[in-house]
Each structure stands twice: as structure tokens, then as C-alpha cells.
Image: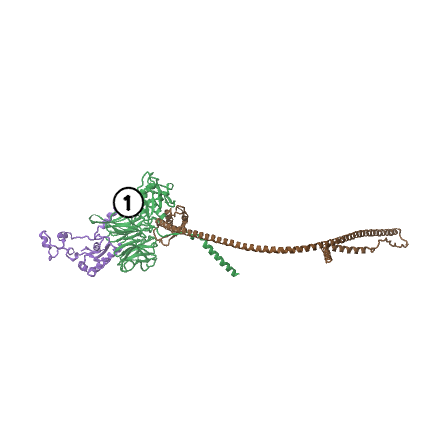
Chain colours: A green, B brown, C purple
Amino acid sequence: MKSVTKKHLGSFLMMLALWLSVATPASAVLTIQITKGVDGAQPIAVVPFATDKLKTALPYDLVSIINNDLARSGRFSPMPAKDIKTIGSPHDGGTVRFADWRLVNMDYLLVGRVRQTGAINYEVQFQLFDVFKGEQLTGISYPFVASDTRRMAHRISDIVYQKLTGQRGAFDTSIAYVTALTGLNNKRQFRLNIADSDGFNEQTILESSKPLMSPSWSPDGQQLAYVSFEAGRPQIFVQQVFSANGQRQRVTDFSGLNGAPIWSPDGKHLAMTLSKSGNPEIYLYELATKQLTQLTKHPAIDTEPSWSPDGKQLVFTSDRGGKAQLYMMRLARNKPASRPRRLTFEGDYNARAAFSPDGKLLAMVHGNRGRFQIAVLDLSNNTLQVLTDSRLDESPSFAPNGSMIIYATNRNNRGVLAAVSVDGRVHQRIEVQQGDVREPAWSPLSQ
Amino acid sequence: MLAYLLSRHTENYMASLIRNNVTAVVFSLAVHALLIFLLVASFDWAPKPQLKVNNPNIVKAVAVDASKVKAELDKLKRAEERKRKKDKDRVAKLKREEQNLKKKRAAEEKRLADLKKKRIAEQKQRKTEQENLAKLKKQQAALKKKQAADDKKRKAAEKKRQLEKARQAKLKKEQDAIKKKQALAKKKREAEKKQRQKELAQQLAAEEQAQADKLAQREIDKYQVLIRQKIERNWLKPPGELKSLISIVEVRLIPGGDVIDVSIVRTSGNLVYDRSAERAVRKASPLPLPQDPVVAAKLFNFKFEFKAE
Amino acid sequence: MNHKLLLAAILLPAVMLTGCETLGGQDGGDVVVEDRGTQVDGGQSADGSDGATSSGAQAGTAFQGHPLDNPQSILSSRVIYFDFDSASIRNEDRAAIKAHAEYLSQHSGASVVLEGHTDERGSREYNIALGERRAKAVRQLLLFQGAVASQIQTVSYGEETPAAIGHDEDSWQQNRRVEITYKTR
């Protein structure tokens, strides 16, 4: 009996193999391999929204803000307005002729209309289309008030960005930065400013004739911690950004350094640098209890702490190895911080670490042969990639969606802000209002 | 010689007669036997029916009852009647039997007479037949002799003729054989010729086909490159780390190169990447196709494998 | 927007007031300085000025004012310079520091503020720490050579208040410094 089954099994398998080899027509279909493409921005046409029936015109044009946002991200290439006019002016899906937009090679199309619902109340309705597929990707209406026009435009940009890249947009965010002005008689003036992510709406929340430094956003985006030399020595302050009276509170005034404040991800602590013990060390300051915990203990300079998004690690700058390099320590409740482990080994100088929002990358100031540039360290494989090409770059700060890094640099003898995409492909300049702009800090995503 | 022959003939005839009428003969013999038996058996062996008178009971005078006597008398009477009846019956029966037997005997006698008659007739016939037969035999012998002589002659002639015929036949056969051979040879030659021609034609056709295929393949290869280039020009790669991402897109074209169906048959796991591949194909439509519609048709359905380097 | 202006309007004067206190403020020597206006050139014989100038300006004659104001005194050297990324005091600066140390030790009422600075290269907070290191290096030397701790204050401005605004080695060198400022004499 056994041998019979065996014989049958053998022939069965053979039949199966034969059948399989024949019954896979898919493998017989020609396959063309595509390995190269174009690195570039996706073409999108944003047709001016219908606003003709408005009793009171909007203070700003939604579409130009949206175009600006999308272009700034480096991932989109909006069609110039004058070219759009020659193709058409649809305001909703019913009047879109995809063939026309395909002809001019637009990948996407955004159309919309605005109507007025009150004295200062409006409603915007927009639709986003995939031109080559000929289908709608999203269609939404939003109410808003006139004073929020710019914000509404940024929100639309965020929606479009997310739909088309799969990543959250960071257009409806703010940046904080310090501006140094030299007035009459060489009198210096320092300002702590915040503005929209596109540089608009600059507002000064603090002015001083003495230096201001190191602005750091609280996780809820409502407060800024910073260093002020207004008393002739550095002190750390915390200030409400958006409240009417801009409440301000001095947090530390120890002898020596009070610097580099940075909020913990849970918003309960500030990590900072104090040199009250004789040399700069990293401390943890609990805001509610004002309790201080010393984290490093080394005669070298230890400063510029940066929190990982999970709050469990701190990366900081230390020259305990001779030159400024980045080190990491692990934090645990009720336990001392772990012994710092060196992270950077390339170049002569690595400082001012900034964690990416997903905790996978560290941006830093990377000094090599006299040039100081922004570099990114991939923590998973320890590879370092230099992103900028200039000489005097500093203060990198990640966008809250992790797509870009804003930093300070020098152009034409002026301090300006610039941004670079995380993969180094896209570079941007940010329009500077006046003075020397430095130390940008990108706010968290709007809650 | 003749008598012997005749008697032989008669015996033969007789024998054949018997042979042909075996059953009849046997039966007639049997019947004869039976009849004889019956005849004998029926001769006075059967006792003549006689009236037998029963000895009456001698009545002894005894003083008896009158009724008793009557009864007794009645009884006697009845017994007598019974007896009488019995006798009567018996007599009747016997009489009947006798009649039957008589009938039978008569019939049998008749039959026997018939048979006799028949036999006589047969004998007579036989005799005449025998005579005829002898006569015939004589004739036949004479005829036979003549026939034999004729036969001989004829046979001789026949043989001659047969020989001649055979010879002719053989000759013909040989000729036929030769003819057949020739025909076969011719056929073979022709078949071979045809075969050769066929092969040549096939070879030519095959060569032409191969040539056409080669050209077609070259065309296809060339257009593969053109198609690939057009897709590459139109593929806007999404930013970020793309290594190890593979999307396979299946497309359907119609004459002219317009893409009428694009579908992702294997996703890379990254939706943005997949969509960029799909978009590249749509944007590149219509795809370049060879002029020859037969060759072009080979490119109406195929796949793209997007694998960024 | 209005609230922000209001805030600024309130804060600005407050900040200005607190910022008004300059550490380099001088007291009590102004009149003397003005008299010495012509001496600002640094000890050269005056050309074509009043005779009082020429007679009083020659070397050999003792300086009549406060030693700290004597431009020829080594005490007038108030800025110590450093190499890139270094807080080591150069040999050529040691004499000056020694002089200040001696002055401080001789004048127990005198006190100085040492301001540490760096050039613009590198990260800001690290430069604050480096500036402090430089200031502390000078402080250490002063202490070694007679000054008392209570007489010395240090503060670092890192790269925030440069002396020269260029982006070349020349400017950078001028910015890598510790400034000695007498709070009290």
C-alpha cells in the first residue's frame, strides 16, 4: 500500500509542478523596469477662488498664500497665476475639464470659492483633484473670520500637503526668533519675535537693549522660555506668547551661566545649563516645584541639552573629549542619568543638537575645516549627512512635521533664516524683515 | 461387368432408398410387428362373453317372518338386480371392447393391405427403376467414356490453355509488377519532390518568420527603451529614502499607445510612492508604439516595475 | 496686534531701565578725563597747541591722574585676546593681568567685572560657556597674583556683543576677548 501511495504522490507532485509552471501567465507578461525618475516638485495648479460675490473683500488672497506655502515646502511647483488664466477658471468639480490641465502637465488641481456669511464671517469651500486620474481627492468647507484669513489659507495648505504627501503639513505654525538691530549711535536693540511660518505677522513679544537668546517653545505652543541679559547677566525667563498681558516669569537667576533652556516633551521640566557649581553643567528644573536636579558632573563644558520626543534621552554638547561634540544620556525616574555616550565622531566640532519630531534624526551644527554647516545624524545607522553648503550656519530647528530644518545663516553680511529639507534636496530662503535674525525655533503643530 | 454395376447400382439404390426413408421403414416395421402381435393376441384368446347365471341361494324353508322374508326377498332381488346390472355392464363393456378390437383389427388389416400394396408397388417401381437405372448406367457409361475422352482432350487443351494463361498471367504479372514498381518509384519520386518542396517552403517560411520575429523583437526592444525613457521623464519621485521600494503597475494600451488602464498589481507599501508610479504612467500616455500593428499588439499589455535606485 | 504694542510699550521702558545700568560706567573721573583730552593721542608731543600741553606731556613727568586712567600705564590694557576655541592666556597678556592683580590687591575697594566674548563661529550657548571659561581663566590668574575673589565678577556674552562685525579672521580675533571693566576703583 505504501509504495502505491508513494508512486501516486510522486506523479501528483510532478503534475502539480507542471501545472504551476504553466498556470502563471503573469510571469510571462513583459515587465519594463523603471529605475530613474525626476527629483522635483510636483506641479499643481491652484485656481484663484471665486470671491467676486463678497460684500467685503478678504484682507488677504487665500490662493497666493497657499501657492507660497506649497512652493516653500519645496515639494510643489505651483502654476503661475497668469498661466492658469489661459487654461480656465473652474471653481468647483462641475466645471473642471481635466484634459485641459493634463495638456499643461499639471498633476493636481485645487479650486474653490468663498462666500460671506456675516459682517466678518466667511466660508471657504475647496476641492482638490488628481488631474491624470480625473478624480477628486478631497472636498471640504470651512467657516472662518476675516482676521483669520492667513491662518485659513495655511490650514488649506496643510490639508493639500497631507493629502498629496501623506505627511502632516506645518504651514499653520509659528516661528520664534531673535532679531538684533543696530540703531543710532551704534545702539543695539534685541527683540524676541514670533511670526507665521511664512514670515508674516511678525510680532515682538520682548524688547531689550541687552542680548536675548535661546527661545524654546513649550509643547502646547503657548509659552516661550528664553535667556535674557537684561540684568547684566543671563537669566532664564518663561513667557506666555499669545495671552493679552504676556505674562512673564523669571525662572532662574543663579550665579554664572543660566542658559539653553529647553522644555521637556511633557511640559513639566526645563533642561538647562547652569555653571553655579563652577563649570557649565546640565540641570533639570521642575517648573511646578522649582526643584533642581544636576544631570552632568564633569569639569568640561556641558551645555545645549535637547530632549528626545519620548522624553527619555537628552543629547547635549560637551568638550569633555577636547573639542565640542555631542553626547547622549538616558534619563530615568528616581535614578541618576546614565553615563553620557559620545555620538559624533566626524568633523572637528559638533554642537547644538536638535531632535527630529520622530526621534530618529539629530540636526546639529557641524564644524569641519573652518566651515560650520548644518548636518543631520541618522541615529539608526550613525550616518551623518551635511545638508548645507555655506560657512556660518547655526541654530537648527526641525519643523514639527519633520520635513524641514530651519536655521540661521549669514548672507550679504546679514544674519538671515533659511530652511533645508531633511534629505538636503530643497533649499529655501526666508524673507527677513530687518536687522540680523538668528536663533529660529519652530513652534509645535497647532493643537 | 454391367450386371455387377447394375446390382451395385440397385443395391445402392436400395440402400439409398432405405437411407432416405429410414424412419418410415423403421416405423413400418414396428407397426408390422405390433399388428402381428395384436393379431395373434386377438385370436380367440379373449374369452367370449357368456352369460353367467349366478347360482341362486337355495332357500331352505324356514319359518320366517313374512316381512323378514319380504326383506330377504327384496334383498335378494336387489342383489340380483345388482348382479344383473353388473353383468349387463360387463357384457356391454366386453361387447364394446370386442367391437373396438374388431375395428382396430380391421383398420390394421387395411393398413397392412395398404402397406402390402405399397410394397408391391414399390417393388414394381424399384424394378422399373432398376431397369432404368441399368439403362441409364449404360448410357452413362458410354457418355462417361465419351466424356472421359472428351475430358481428356479438353483437359489437355485446357491444360495447354491454362499453361498459356498462366504464362500470360505471369507475364502480365511481371509487367504489372514492373509497372507498379515504376509507378511506385514515380510516386516516391514525386512524393520526395513534394516533400522537398514543402520543406524548402517551410524553411523559407521559417526563415522569413524568424527574420520577421527578429525585426519585430528589435522593434519591441527599441520601443521598450522609448517607453521606458518616456516614463522616466514623467516620473516625479517622492522625496525621502526610496531604496527597497518596488511598485509594479500593469497597463493596457490601445492602438495609438493611449493607456486605457493602469493598476497597481504590487504595492511598495508606500502609498505616495505607488501613486507617483501610477501618475507617471498616466502622464506619459500615449506611449510610443511600433508602426506595424502586429508588432505593436505585442505591447498592448505589460507591466512596469518601479524600483528607484 | 494692539495688545502686542501695548505690551511692548509697557515693557520697553521697564527693560530700558533695567538695561540702563551699564557695567562700564565711570564715576568721579570725568573732569580729569576732559583735562587730558589732548593726551588721548597717547603720549606724543602735541603739535601746535598751547604751551601747557607741551610742557606737561613729556615723558619722565609723573602722570597726575588716576593710575587706571593713565593711558601709558599697563593698566590701560583692558582687553585680553584669545586663540580660536581656546581659553589659554597668551604670554604677552600676562604682564597686564599681573598689573591688574597688583592694583586690586593694593586697592581692596576696587572691583572688576570680567566680560568673556567669543567670535561668531560655532553655536551660541557653547560660546557663552567658552566666554565664561575665558573670563574665569583671567580671574584665576588675577586671584593667583593677589586679587581677592570678592573683587572679581565674571559674565559671558559669548558671541552676542561683538567688537567687530566683519566675517573674517581679523574681526574674529578682535571678538575673542575678555574685557576688564572696573566697577569700583
Name the element at disc 1.
helix
Horizontal and vertical percent for residue C85?
24, 57
Quadrant placement of the N terminus of chain B: bottom right
Left or right, residue A359 beside residue C20: right
The outermost residue toward the left is C51
Left or right, residue B202 beside residue A91: right
Left or right, residue C20 beside residue B24: left
Check disc 1 and give the amino acid type: His
Horizontal and vertical percent for residue C8?
26, 46
The chain holding disc 1 is C
Quarter residue C129 falls in: bottom left
Number of marks drawn: 1
Left or right, residue B49 beside residue B14: right
Q: From this viewpoint, is residue B233 visible?
A: yes
Quadrant placement of the C terminus of chain B: bottom left
Q: Nearer the viewer, residue C62 or A83?
A: A83
Q: From this viewpoint, is residue B269 visible?
A: no
Quarter residue A321 falls in: bottom left
Horizontal and vertical percent for residue A134?
38, 44
Q: Nearer the viewer, residue A93 or A331?
A: A93
Q: Which residue is mark 1?
A: C3
Horizontal and vertical percent for residue A379?
33, 56
